């Protein structure tokens, strides 16, 4: 988790988050490159009523163990909107390390509940600590296995 992550662009944010997952042993070499390649083909930006969010993820081949990295960006970065492919300013990134593809859809649906609830999304954005973010997201995911 990263609160107040300052980066210059999407690629820098994704690299930082990939590195965090790799340092924890959750993802393999090549995860970052796979995230970038997938993002080019299948954008993950989502416009919500409160702000733009993104859910970058890639194939389970690059994942050792399930996990999620969350970054709150006080200075948004541009992602492509998954529906329109237009540029979208993103302020919160939920990077998924999905180990079992069969759990991916349910995890994305549960994260959708976060995105569609402006109060919950605002709470994540305004959280002061990593622990606060973890508690908010964990309550939504209900210990979902990624």
Image (spheres, grey):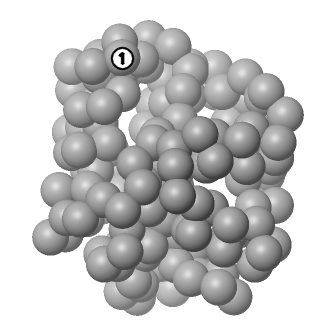
Is residue 65 placed above or below 137 in the rendered structure? above
**18 vs 7, nearest the viewer:** 7
Image location (x, y in percent) of residue 82 = 52, 72
* Residue drawn at (37%, 74%) of the image: 74
Is residue 36 placed above or below 106 in the rendered structure? below
The secondary structure type at the circle numbered 1 is loop
Q: Crowding at label 1, few (<14), some or many (≥20) Cα neighbours within 10 Å?
A: few
The answer to whether residue 97 is left or right of residue 137 is: left
Image location (x, y in percent) of residue 66 = 56, 21
Q: Quadrant of residue 8?
A: bottom left
* Residue drawn at (53%, 35%) of the image: 68
Quadrant (top left/top right/bottom left/bottom right) for the C terminus: top right
Is residue 48 placed above or below 92 in the rendered structure? below
* Residue drawn at (36%, 17%) of the image: 24
The answer to whether residue 140 is left or right of residue 21 is: right
Q: Quadrant of residue 135?
A: top right
Q: How many marks?
A: 1
Q: Is residue 44 visible?
A: no
Q: Is residue 6 visible?
A: yes
Image location (x, y in percent) of residue 106 = 80, 40
Q: Quadrant of residue 13?
A: bottom left
User: What residue is disc 1 on?
Assistant: 24
Image location (x, y in percent) of residue 88 = 41, 84
* Residue drawn at (19%, 64%) of the image: 7
Quadrant (top left/top right/bottom left/bottom right) for the N terminus: top left
């Amino acid at each position: 988790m990263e609160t107040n992550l300052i980066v210059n662009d999407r690629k820098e944010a994704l690299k930082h988050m990939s590195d965090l997952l790799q340092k924890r042993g959750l993802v393999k070499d090549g995860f970052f490159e796979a995230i970038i390649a997938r993002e080019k083909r299948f954008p993950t930006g989502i416009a919500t009523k409160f702000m733009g969010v993104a859910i970058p993820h890639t194939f389970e081949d690059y994942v050792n163990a399930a996990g999620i990295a969350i970054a709150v960006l006080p200075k948004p970065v541009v992602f492509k909107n998954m529906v329109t492919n237009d540029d979208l300013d993103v302020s919160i990134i939920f990077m998924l390390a999905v180990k079992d593809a069969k759990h991916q859809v349910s995890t994305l649906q549960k994260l959708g509940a976060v995105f569609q609830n402006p109060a919950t999304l605002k709470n994540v954005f305004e959280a002061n600590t990593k622990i606060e973010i973890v508690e908010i997201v964990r309550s939504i995911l209900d210990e979902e296995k990624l």
